[in-house]
Image (tube, helix red, strand yellow):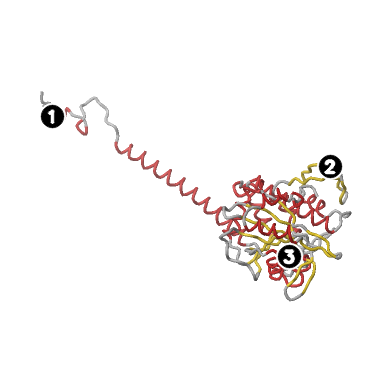
């Protein structure tokens, strides 16, 4: 049957009188509010993320850069970074000068083609090497003679490995990094005292000041202090891995600030490469730490030509773990 009701008997929009029509304007207003709110939140999150990126990029960009010759651009088989440190004695020598005073800490950090850390190799600083243009001298003296470039060239000739980047640590700023990380853990084989602080045998969780006391213990030989520096660097890197500082905002600010003060890198090291290196630390817990094997000939310390040759080959072929299994005496002690 056809509905013959007139206009007065119909509600607005053709709805019968007595029924309630949904208010389209209110519905449109609610939808518009939701869209605007989502857009505002998205913009805010984007602004926060953008601000964080700008901050991180600024801090990494403030890391001191120095020109270094003899670096290789070939990274097809991975990346090898020459890591040194400002010379540091019992009272903390060295500084932030672009002219190094020599380095007792000489390490090769190898990142394999999968962008994970393939191994860390320490080269004893008293090793006598052939230095281009200067004859034979102990490795720790090379940087003082010819700066980062001569050290890079010398290590390249010694190992046959392409060196892709150079990094120098200023130990005067290591304490700030340790504090930014909430402290680090170091292990001692027996109870010892340094600058009035007693380090019990076993694992010690130390703050920045205690970390430097650990590295500068007066009773240690120069070789012993180098081993302590290596151990401290290892503890810092391991803690950076465990704390995931790039994803922990409350640690990121102070850690990046300390990092920018602590490091000097070669001028080809881009901000993105530095951040990529930090990301690679995620696999540090499974990393192999070894010390290049040496032997003494006529009272001169040199790299063992046979085992050393096997070590350099292992780094080139990402098989450092297998090398360490074959030559366990080369493993760097966690508790020097």
C-alpha separation, residue under disc 2 versus residue under disc 1: 99 Å
Tag of residue 6: 1
Q: Is residue 212 left or right of residue 50?
A: right
Tell me which label, 2 or 1, sits earlier in the chain.
Answer: 1
Q: Residue at x 76, y 62 (%)?
A: 303
Does residue 4 sit above or below 270 in this rendering? above
Residue 155, quarter of the rendered image: bottom right
Q: Residue furthest top?
A: 1
**Residue 82's spot in the image, x, y percent?**
68, 62
Quadrant of the frame with the N terminus:
top left
The kind of secondary structure element at disc 1 is: loop
Front one among 190 and 48: 190
The kind of secondary structure element at disc 3 is: loop
**Residue 158's spot in the image, x, y percent?**
71, 66
C-alpha separation, residue under disc 3 versus residue under disc 1: 93 Å
Label 1 CA crowd tier, 10 Å (few <14, some 14–19, many 20+): few
Q: Residue at x 30, y 34 (%)?
A: 23
**Residue 321's spot in the image, x, y percent?**
67, 49
Residue 151, quarter of the rendered image: bottom right
Tell me which label, 3 or 1, sits earlier in the chain.
Answer: 1
Tag of residue 22: none
C-beta proximity under 8 Å, tags 3 and 2: no
The residue that disc 3 covers is 96
The residue that disc 2 covers is 201
Tell me which label, 3 or 2, sits earlier in the chain.
Answer: 3
Front one among 141 and 183: 141
The kind of secondary structure element at disc 2 is: loop
**Residue 113's spot in the image, x, y percent?**
57, 55
C-alpha separation, residue under disc 3 versus residue under disc 2: 34 Å
Q: Residue at x 21, y 29 (%)?
A: 15
Label 2 CA crowd tier, 10 Å (few <14, some 14–19, many 20+): few
Does residue 287 sit above or below 31 in this rendering? below
């Amino acid at each position: 049957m056809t509905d013959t009701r007139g206009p007065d008997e119909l509600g607005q929009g053709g709805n019968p009188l007595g029924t309630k029509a949904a208010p389209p304007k209110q519905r449109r207003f609610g939808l518009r509010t939701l869209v605007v709110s989502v857009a505002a939140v998205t913009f805010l999150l984007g602004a926060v993320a953008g601000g964080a990126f700008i901050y991180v990029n600024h801090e990494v960009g403030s890391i001191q850069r120095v020109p270094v010759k003899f670096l290789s651009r070939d990274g097809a088989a991975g990346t090898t970074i020459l890591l040194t440190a400002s010379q540091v004695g019992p009272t903390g020598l060295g500084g932030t000068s672009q002219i190094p005073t020599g380095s007792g800490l000489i390490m090769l950090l190898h990142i394999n083609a999968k962008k994970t850390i393939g191994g860390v190799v320490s080269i004893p600083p008293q090793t006598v090497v052939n230095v281009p243009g200067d004859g034979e001298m102990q490795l720790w003296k090379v940087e003082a003679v010819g700066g980062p470039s001569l050290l890079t060239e010398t290590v390249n000739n010694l190992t046959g490995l392409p060196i892709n980047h150079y990094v120098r640590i200023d130990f005067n700023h290591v304490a700030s990094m340790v504090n930014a990380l909430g402290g680090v853990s170091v292990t001692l084989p027996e109870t010892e005292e340094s600058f009035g602080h007693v380090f019990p045998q076993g694992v010690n969780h130390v703050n920045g000041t205690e970390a430097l006391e650990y590295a500068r213990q007066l009773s240690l030989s120069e070789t012993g202090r180098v081993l302590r520096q290596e151990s401290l660097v290892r503890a810092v890197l391991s803690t950076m891995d465990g704390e995931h500082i790039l994803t922990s905002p409350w640690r990121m600010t102070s850690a990046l600030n300390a990092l920018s003060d602590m490091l000097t890198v070669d001028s080809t090291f881009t901000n993105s490469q530095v951040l990529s290196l930090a990301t690679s630390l995620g696999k540090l817990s499974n990393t192999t730490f070894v010390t290049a094997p040496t032997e003494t000939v006529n009272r001169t310390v040199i790299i063992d030509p046979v085992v050393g040759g096997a070590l350099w080959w292992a780094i080139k072929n990402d098989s450092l773990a297998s090398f360490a299994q074959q030559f366990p005496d080369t493993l760097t002690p966690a508790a020097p």
